[in-house]
Amino acid sequence: MEATRLSAKEKIGYGLGDAASHIVFDNVMFYMAFFYTDVFGLPAAFVGGMFLAARALDAVSDPVMGWMSDRTRSRWGKFRPYLLFGAIPFGISCVLAYSTPHLGVSGKMIFAMVTYTLLTLMYTVVNIPYCALGGVITGDDRERISLQSYRFVLATAGGMLSTIAMVPLAHWIGGANRAAGYQGAIAVLAVLAVIMLVGCFATTRERVVPKARAGSTFIADLKDIVRNDQWRVVGVLTILNILAVATRGGAMMYYVTYVLGRAGLFTWFLATYSVGNILGCLLTKPLTDRICKVSVFTWTNGVLAVLSGVMFLISPRDEVLMFLFVFVIGVLHQMITPIQWVMMSDTVDYGEWKQGKRLTGVSFAGTLFVLKLGLALSGAAIGWALGAYGYVAGAKAQSPGAEHCIIALFTLVPAAMYGLSGLVAGRYRLRREQMREIAAALGAAGH
């Protein structure tokens, strides 16, 4: 296929789609547990169980969405229509999830379960086609790398906008009424997300058309994905790395509120972490141009594990040092995120080379399912751990056990997850030389 040089407008437009997704994804990671326990008044243990239970639907909806998008035929292409028609329902689901009707405890639990499930379902509808879209905008490798670089810078900026603006917006809109404030803040952010998704649809084009092949069943495609041993490795890495960042992120509000005793630091912690994220995005490509991406991924996870463990030893009173660690961890974590997405794409090529079938939509759907599973496991771990150690929502101070639990969730749990990720990465075989061989074999076969 002739290489197509993409305009900056199209690259930015594509990145807007992930910026919209991160408005919700980062909110769930950093705010949702705290919102449910301290604003909506739900038991922490129930919140943890709800996060995990919602993944039962994802186990079906994610691969079905990938399978459907792979087979969609429209004048707009296979994946772009879902961004257009899913944008407004996606925005509405955001507002519903942050609504706080006056119900009894049981009624609140049911409402939260329904609206949170709807939110995750609508996230699936727009995000799985979006991720697959990146593989059909261009077939040129260099342009794909550039496209993903734009994507992750804008995704980080979207998440930064969402997480930093959430608390000030909530305070400005609702004042002392935190429930109204949170709902109003997410409504503003949801409108921005809708505009971004429509912008992504309007500025991108699908140029790579897969060769027609005999249709296969949904179950057959799933079996082929599971048989892909390198996809399984990336799946485990995805869970471990999202567990690390989401557990730290979900515990951050509790940490600044009850350990540091200054809830207002939360916005500054997020800003520091997000600036580090953007710098990490910018460093990934020049670093991986010189060093194998798998080596960078492995060693960076090891360094993150060590730094996270050292954070446990830092006195909460040493705020300057804590901010420095948060910044450095933000840089390093976002360096490995683009690499992990490239590894996901590599497993698609590997699967086609090994099995003779290219399953882009289903592959990314499966990966996004394990990503959300990791996010749910982190939420469950936070809720269950706080419940087990006697956390009292809204208290002026927590018991020593609950405080130690919060510190461990913020430091030691991420350290363990990063350490395991570094070890598991040793089982990933698709290094630069192997991918060159696969590319040559697919090219010789007329790919």
Image (cartoon, grey):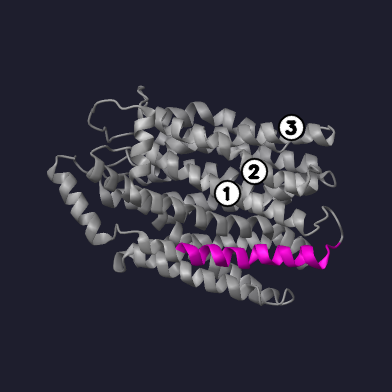
CA neighbours of label 2 inside 10 A, class few (<14), some (14 to 19), many (20+): many
Tag 1 or tag 2, which sits nearer the N-term?
Answer: 2
For the residue marked with disc 1, what is the amino acid?
Leu
Q: In the displayed structure, would residue 425 be above or below residue 99?
A: below
For the residue marked with disc 2, what is the amino acid?
Phe
Quadrant of the image occupied by residue 315: bottom right
Residue highlighted by disc 2: 51
Tag 2 or tag 3, which sits nearer the N-term?
Answer: 2
Which quadrant is home to the N terminus? top left
Q: Are marks 2 and 1 in contact (CB under 8 Å)?
A: yes
Which residue is found at the position 45% from the left and 30% from the top?
64
Which segment is the magenta one?
397-421
Give the alpha-carbon distance from disc 2 to disc 1, as whole Å.
Answer: 8 Å
Residue highlighted by disc 3: 110
Count of all numbered marks drawn on residues in the image: 3
Residue 363 x/y as whole percent: 38, 41
Q: Nearer the viewer, residue 90 or 241?
A: 241
By secondary structure, the bulk of the magenta-drawn segment is best described as: helix
Residue 389 x/y as whole percent: 77, 60
Residue highlighted by disc 1: 375
Q: Is residue 146 visible?
A: no
